[in-house]
């Protein structure tokens, strides 16, 4: 009985070592992909100065910025993720909801933008293929370049291009 237990423990140990090696070298390359079920909400609040277009005066206010990044699972596949991002800036007056529309009677909407982008699930680089419907505020002529919304897995200490939807440019960003 003791020999059987010893053999069984040795077998379990060998299996554990083999599994650890497999997980260390095989699994990461397959698991390090952007998930296909993102639904991320980021909210920031802070002071701001806004130009009142009616009076020409600069006014102090507080803004709420709500960004939502959500995967379009139907348009994504095993190599490419398609995400839809919205950014809503509202004046923090009368406890506003996440976003208001342009007809808000309190005129709290400052800006609303959308960005739809396709990116390689491993490298995070933009993929410009018309079948993914990439656009900024509905404008399909803008082409995303570089990284969008995330760094690649195992980012290197090097310079990357990181796309900015507001300017439609890809300034340099350094990986650390």
Image (tube, rainbow, N blue to C red):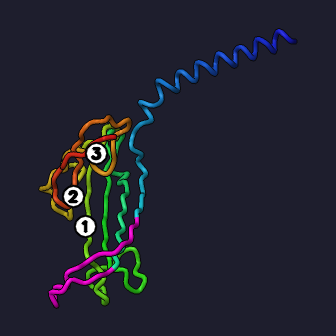
Q: Nearer the viewer, mark 2 or mark 3?
A: 2
Residue bounds of the magenta highlight: 43-61
Q: Position of residue 87 (x, y in %)?
A: 31, 66
Q: Real-space Cα distance between discs 2 and 1?
A: 9 Å
Quick one: 47 or 37, which is closer to the camera?
A: 47
Instruction: Tell which circle, 1 or 3, labels the residue nearer the N-terminal end.
Output: 1
Residue marked by disc 3: 119
**Inter-mark Cα distance, 2 to 3:** 14 Å
Q: Quadrant of the N terminus?
A: top right
Q: Determine the image quadrant of residue 21.
A: top right
Q: Give the residue number, with chain letter if any, for mark 1.
A: 113
Residue at the spot x=48%, y=29% of the render? 27
Q: Quarter of the image holding residue 103?
A: bottom left
Is 13 drawn above or below residue 42 in the view shown? above
Q: Say if mark 1 contacts mark 3, CB within 8 Å.
A: no
Q: Position of residue 25 (x, y in %)?
A: 47, 23
Most common secondary structure along the magenta stretch: strand
* Distance from the alpha carbon under mark 1 to that under mark 3: 19 Å
Dot 2 crowding, Cα within 10 Å, few <14, some 14–19, many 20+: many
- In the image, 58 versus 71, the foreground residue is 58
Q: Is residue 21 left or right of residue 130?
A: right
Per the image, label 1 sits on a secondary structure element best described as: strand
Residue 66: % across, % down: 36, 68
The answer to whether the residue labelled 2 contacts the one labelled 3, judged by CB atoms less than 8 Å apart, is no
Residue 20's disc number: none
Name the N-terminal-most of marks 2 and 1.
1
Q: Which residue occupies the foreground of this view, 133 or 160?
A: 160
Q: Residues within 10 Å of mark 1 (few under 14, many from 20)?
A: some
Q: Which circle marks residue 165 in the picture? A: 2
């Amino acid at each position: 009985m003791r020999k059987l237990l010893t053999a069984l423990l040795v077998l379990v140990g060998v299996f554990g070592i083999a599994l650890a090696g497999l997980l260390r070298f095989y699994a990461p390359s397959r698991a390090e992909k952007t998930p296909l079920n993102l639904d991320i909400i980021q909210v920031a609040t802070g002071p701001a100065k806004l130009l009142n277009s009616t009076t020409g005066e600069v006014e102090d206010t507080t803004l709420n910025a709500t960004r939502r990044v959500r995967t379009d699972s139907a348009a994504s596949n095993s190599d490419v993720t398609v995400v839809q991002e919205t950014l809503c800036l509202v004046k923090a007056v009368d406890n506003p909801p996440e976003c208001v529309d342009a007809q808000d009677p309190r005129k709290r909407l400052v800006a609303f933008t959308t960005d739809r982008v396709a990116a390689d699930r491993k490298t995070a680089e933009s993929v410009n293929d018309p079948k993914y419907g990439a656009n900024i505020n509905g404008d399909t002529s803008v082409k995303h370049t570089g990284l969008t919304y995330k760094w690649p897995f195992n980012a290197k200490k090097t310079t990357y291009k990181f796309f900015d939807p507001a300017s439609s440019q890809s300034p340099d960003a350094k990986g650390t």
